[in-house]
Amino acid sequence: METPLKYMCVLVILMSMTIAGLNGVEGTANYYGPCGKHDIQKEAEKLEPCTYAAQHRRSPVSERCCTVMEKKVKNPACLCAVLYSQTAYDAGVRPEIAVTIPKRCNIADRPVGYQCGDFTLP
């Protein structure tokens, strides 16, 4: 009688772990942010070459900044999250100027008209 009880306990534990695991797999997609699995603060650090251009509207945009920005505009929700991140704020990035960088880089397939917080991508 003791052995079937052990097997029953093990079976119950395995079933509960399986159910919890399946619910976790289904529910994890809701935990990702606008940049998917990527951390917004780390994504903001990648835009470091654009810091000066994101602070001064008339400053020239470096080629390195444009290369990075060309990758970022493919996911405008992530770009907006990055522009409004704490890292960008600490670096002195002004979102109203930063949203103009894709146009200043002459990126052809930029998301024109995308609403980024209070500002629209030109």
Image (cartoon, rainbow, N blue to C red):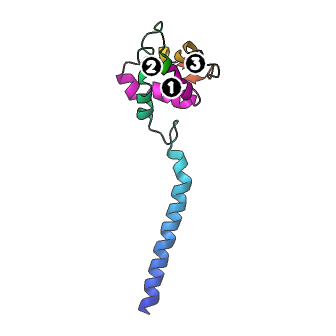
Q: Position of residue 5 (x, y in %)?
A: 44, 86
Category of crowding for the residue at label 3, using alpha-carbon neighbours closer than 10 angstroms: few (below 14), some (14–19), many (at least 20): many
Residue appearing at x 41%, y 19% in the figure: 51
The question of residue 40 being in magenta is answered with no
Category of crowding for the residue at label 2, using alpha-carbon neighbours closer than 10 angstroms: few (below 14), some (14–19), many (at least 20): many
What's the amino acid at mark 3?
Leu
Quarter of the C terminus within the rendering: top right
What's the amino acid at mark 2?
Cys
Q: Position of residue 38 (x, y in %)?
A: 47, 39
The residue identified by callout 2 is 50
The residue identified by callout 3 is 121
Camera-side mark, 1 or 3: 1
Residue 106: quarter of image = top right
The residue identified by callout 1 is 68
What's drawn in magenta, residue-wise?
A: 65-93
- The secondary structure type at the circle numbered 2 is helix
Residue appearing at x 43%, y 21% in the figure: 49
